[in-house]
Image (cartoon, rainbow, N blue to C red):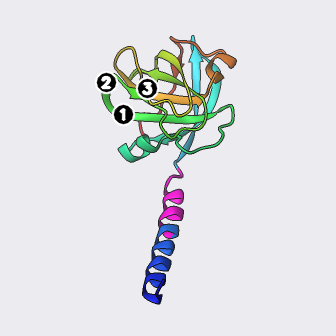
Amino acid sequence: MNSKNKNLLLIFYFLFLIFYFSSCDSNKLPVQEIAIERDGKVITVIKAEIAKTQEERSMGLMYRKSLQDGYGMLFIFDKDEVLSFWMKNTLIPLSIAFITYDGKIIDIKDMYPQDTNSVKSSRSARYALEAPQGWFSRVGVNVGDSVKIDKNY
């Protein structure tokens, strides 16, 4: 390999490292404590990263190797629609709660690592909350419970 090719390879390598590390920093999303209630009483609280842009929602929890109980990601959409998620490049099993514009949980479904089949809400929803698989049932969260979502996200 001549020196020109070596220099080009070195430049490519450094550009890759810069891109990789800068994209890791930009993936740090704000975290909010979100209460889940039943009959006006808090059942539990989850610390959720807030994903509200298309880029943030598309990345989701991809490439993560673990996620602690009590932590997750809240996906915020601009309008009500049937939501669809898949687990391409997602390495950990998750559960997802689909939530209406007024905070009611309408579905809780399990999702599996690397599964490219779509998991859809049963009807229009505005939000989706992902947590470690089984977390919702472990803390007693059910369909019909309410998620207290700050509309200012």
Between 53 and 132, the residue placed more toward the observer is: 132
Q: Is residue 32 above or below residue 29?
A: above
Label 3 environment density (alpha carbons within 10 Å; few <14, some 14–19, many ≥20): few
Q: Is residue 81 magenta?
A: no
Q: On the rendered structure, is 133 left or right of 51? A: right
Of the image marks 1 and 3, the number of the one nearer the N terminus: 1
Instruction: Give the magenta part as a residue range.
Output: 18-28
Q: Pinpoint residue 22: horizontal percent, then vertical percent.
A: 50, 64
Mark in the foreground, 2 or 3: 3
Q: Are marks 2 and 1 in contact (CB under 8 Å)?
A: yes
Q: Amino acid at mark 2?
A: Glu
On the rendered image, what quadrant is the C terminus found in? Answer: top left
Q: What label sits on residue 77 in the rendered view?
A: 1
Q: Amino acid at mark 1?
A: Phe
> Which element is circle 3 on?
loop
Q: Is residue 15 above or below residue 49?
A: below
Q: Give the residue pinned by disc 3.
A: 117
Q: On the rendered structure, is 87 left or right of 135? A: left
Mark in the foreground, 1 or 3: 3
Q: What label sits on residue 81 in the rendered view?
A: 2
Q: What label sits on residue 69 in the rendered view?
A: none
What residue is drawn where x is 53% and y is 36%?
Answer: 73
Label 1 environment density (alpha carbons within 10 Å; few <14, some 14–19, many ≥20): some
Of the image marks 2 and 3, the number of the one nearer the N terminus: 2
Q: On the rendered structure, is 78 left or right of 51? A: left
Kindly report the distance in space between the C-alpha atoms of the residues bearing marks 2 and 1.
9 Å
Kindly report the distance in space between the C-alpha atoms of the residues bearing marks 2 and 3.
19 Å
Q: Are marks 1 and 3 in contact (CB under 8 Å)?
A: no
Q: Pinpoint residue 116: horizontal percent, then vertical percent.
A: 45, 30
